[in-house]
């Protein structure tokens, strides 16, 4: 029984449906605000109660962010602006901190800090927290439910990002396939159409991303895509410059495509064709690397550790992906729609794919170490989990490629294939004499009838050749395995797209550690927060002491102590005493006598820490005239 492969139209439709379904699932499950930067600290802290109104609110981030005039807003209990709107750059060394001044004479109550900015790797981030002056109060502030980068704009931007990766792969990989694997493919129309569509896809997706960039990082309203002032502001950002550069490079890519499918395809002299292929190879590589660089210079590779190494590695990674997956796409189209693809072309592509996989493994290992950093982040963060999925898909893809390679070895030799084609052409030319005579008679009587008969004969010959080609079990097996490769590649590309908009595991773990509510150690320029359970043994003698020393470094510090019952409600105690001791230097104990602010809240300002080191903080809690206890913990103060 003859085995035939599915039609290309049906196969492509299945691939598109699979891509859309998977991309929708992944985008729906992704947190819209996931990005590289994270808020690691604030002053005042989330939920803090301060005795008097601070002069400003400060935010600390894990990496550099782009601040605008409205990036930090402080709202009073009634929802009115309580800040001056003047953003202050407080960055120092590796510490990324920004602040906004507060108006004078703020009344007591709960204030909301809402912030929104763009991280150094181009992704929008946002959040909100509250603090109270004097005592907590009710607040009427209603913040938007949608995070930055979410909603319909975020979905469209994510789809455009996915489509741009696909277009890049087809454009670059298709051109490489023609030059390196099948030079005769430059004159094959389905190959030309595929590569040109890759260029059109990448260009269209880039324009969409450029228009959506303003609402994506700002209001989230689709109508703002055509705001000229917003578009101008986008062009002045790093991402805007990268997208604009990509469009300029796509102009050069259009020239490359025109020469490849024009002058190169028409060349007949072997030497001239070889010289032109060399020039196209050099020029195409430069343009492809430049387009890949527009991602590397604006996204994850451009920030974090070792950006000078990460960016060229990212460019190599993208080029290897394009050479493999883009070439695979053109090979799939050729196997279904083009004349018989020679075995030599498939074998050359197999070698290109093997080299691409080797580059992907090397660059992928480095990128994984850089973005994840630890085994716990690999399994305990969303980025790490997606990376494991990507690695699994890569293994599946390599396995299918091995099967395709086995089918390639079983193909007929090129000479045999050419002989078969010549035989078919001879067979088609040796049409029945009746048909020839009928055509001659029709030509004498009716030229239009003769032309119609000639077209029918050509269609019959083409159909016969297609049947013979589809009946080849080795070639049909190769088509099926390549189609399966392409299906897995679609899924792999979708996972990669989501990875580019997900906060790397290394940053997520560092941010989580830096913002822990209680811990035995402090990092430079971040408050010391400790939690100490106590039991004086008397009536109502159990509870928890929460102590905060801000900013947690040498010099003057603000001390806040909150005494709570086991159920978390404030506990009023007669007396709290604090002592600080640096045993390594025989300093202390230094007594601190905090003042009672309100029920369960004690505070002291100007607490002096004379030198850095590991300090022992002792807290004495008295719950009655005779019941008291002393609890302590060691913390590192920088």
Image (tube, rainbow, N blue to C red):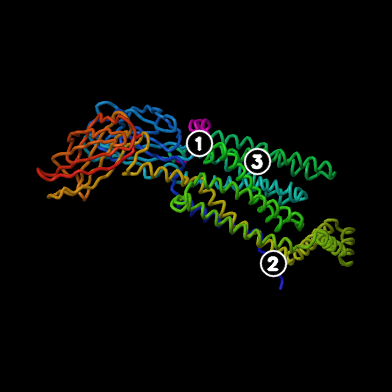
Q: CA distance from mark 1 to mark 3?
A: 30 Å
Name the foreground residue: 607 vs 351: 607
Which dot, 1 or 3, sits closer to the camera?
3
What residue is shown at x 62% (from left), y 60% (from top)?
Answer: 399
Q: Secondary structure at mark 2?
A: loop
Q: Which residue is mark 3?
A: 288
* Predominant secondary structure, magenta span: helix
Q: CA distance from mark 2 to mark 3?
A: 37 Å
What residue is shown at x 35% (from left), y 36% (from top)?
Answer: 526
Which dot, 1 or 2, sits closer to the camera?
2
Residue 385 shows up from this direction: yes
Compared to residue 603, the image places residue 267 above or below, namely: below
Whichever of callouts 1 and 3 sits on the residue coming sooner in the sequence is: 1
User: Where in the figure is residue 574, as x and y percent of width and height?
Assistant: 13, 40
Tell me the number on the disc at residue 4: 2
Look at the image and tell me in which quarter the N terminus lies: bottom right
Compared to residue 297, the image places residue 152 above or below, namely: below
Name the foreground residue: 368 vs 328: 368
Mark 1 vs 3: CB contact within 8 A: no
What residue is shown at x 51% (from left), y 54% (from top)?
Answer: 388
Question: What is the quadrant of residue 38 in the picture?
Answer: top left
Mark 2 vs 3: CB contact within 8 A: no
Name the foreground residue: 113 vs 467: 113
Q: Which residue is mark 1?
A: 226
Q: CA distance from mark 1 to mark 2?
A: 50 Å
Give the extent of the magenta segment: 221-239
Which dot, 2 or 3, sits closer to the camera?
3
Q: Secondary structure at mark 1?
A: helix
Look at the image and tell me in which quarter the C terminus lies: top left
* Residue at the extreme left of the image, as rendered: 625
Q: Is residue 271 magenta?
A: no
Compared to residue 603, the image places residue 443 above or below, namely: below
């Amino acid at each position: 029984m003859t085995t035939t492969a599915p039609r290309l139209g049906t196969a492509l439709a299945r691939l598109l449906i699979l891509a859309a379904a998977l991309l929708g699932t992944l985008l729906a499950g992704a947190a819209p605000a996931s990005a590289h930067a994270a808020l690691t600290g604030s002053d005042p802290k989330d939920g803090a109660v301060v005795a008097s109104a601070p002069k400003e609110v400060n935010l600390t981030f894990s990496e550099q962010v782009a601040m605008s005039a409205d990036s930090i807003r402080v709202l009073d209990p009634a929802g009115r602006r309580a800040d001056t709107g003047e953003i202050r750059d407080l960055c120092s060394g590796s510490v990324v901190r920004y602040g906004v001044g507060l108006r004078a004479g703020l009344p007591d109550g709960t204030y909301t800090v809402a912030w929104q900015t763009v991280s150094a790797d181009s992704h929008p981030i946002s959040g909100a927290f509250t603090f109270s002056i004097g005592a907590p109060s009710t607040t009427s502030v209603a913040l938007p439910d949608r995070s930055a980068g979410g909603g319909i704009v975020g979905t469209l931007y994510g789809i455009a990002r996915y489509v741009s990766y696909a277009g890049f792969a087809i454009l670059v990989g298709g051109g490489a396939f023609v030059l390196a694997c099948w030079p005769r493919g430059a004159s094959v129309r389905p190959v030309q159409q595929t590569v040109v569509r890759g260029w059109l896809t990448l260009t269209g997706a880039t324009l969409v991303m450029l228009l959506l960039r303003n609402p994506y990082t700002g209001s989230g309203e689709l109508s703002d895509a055509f705001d000229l002032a917003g578009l101008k502001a986008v062009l002045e950002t790093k991402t805007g410059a990268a997208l604009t550069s990509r469009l300029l490079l796509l102009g050069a890519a259009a020239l490359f495509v025109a020469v490849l499918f024009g002058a190169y395809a028409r060349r007949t002299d072997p030497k001239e064709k070889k010289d032109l292929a060399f020039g196209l190879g050099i020029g195409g590589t430069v343009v492809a690397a430049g387009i890949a660089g527009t991602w590397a210079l604006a996204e994850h590779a451009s920030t974090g550790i070792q950006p000078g190494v990460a960016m060229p590695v990212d460019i190599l990674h993208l080029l290897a992906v394009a050479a493999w997956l883009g070439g695979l796409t053109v090979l799939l189209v050729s196997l279904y729609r083009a004349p018989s693809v020679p075995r030599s072309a498939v074998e050359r592509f197999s070698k290109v794919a093997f080299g691409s996989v080797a580059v992907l493994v090397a660059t992928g290992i480095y990128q994984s170490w850089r973005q994840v950093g630890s085994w716990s982040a690999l399994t305990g963060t969303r980025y790490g989990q997606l990376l494991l999925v990507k690695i699994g898909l890569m293994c599946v893809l390599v396995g299918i490629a091995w099967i395709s390679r086995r089918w390639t070895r079983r193909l007929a030799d090129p000479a045999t294939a050419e002989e078969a084609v010549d035989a078919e052409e001879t067979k088609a030319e040796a049409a029945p004499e009746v048909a020839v005579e009928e055509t001659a008679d029709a030509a004498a009587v009716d030229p239009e009838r003769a032309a119609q008969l000639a077209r029918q004969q050509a269609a019959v010959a083409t159909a016969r050749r297609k049947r013979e080609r589809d009946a080849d079990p080795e070639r049909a097996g190769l088509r099926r395995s390549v189609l399966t490769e392409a299906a897995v590649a679609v899924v792999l590309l979708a996972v990669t797209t989501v990875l580019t908009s997900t906060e790397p595991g290394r940053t997520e773990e560092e941010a989580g550690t830096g913002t822990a509510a209680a811990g035995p150690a402090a990092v430079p320029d971040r408050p010391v927060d400790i939690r100490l359970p106590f039991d004086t043994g008397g009536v109502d003698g159990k509870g928890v002491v929460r102590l905060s020393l801000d900013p947690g470094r040498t010099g003057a510090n603000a001390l806040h102590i909150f005494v709570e019952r086991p159920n978390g409600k404030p506990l009023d105690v007669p007396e709290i005493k604090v002592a600080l001791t640096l045993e390594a230097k025989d300093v202390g104990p230094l007594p601190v006598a905090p003042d009672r602010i309100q029920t369960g809240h004690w505070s002291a300002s100007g607490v002096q820490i004379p030198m850095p080191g590991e300090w022992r903080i002792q807290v004495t809690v008295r719950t009655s005239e005779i019941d008291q206890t002393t609890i302590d913990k060691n913390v590192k103060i920088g």
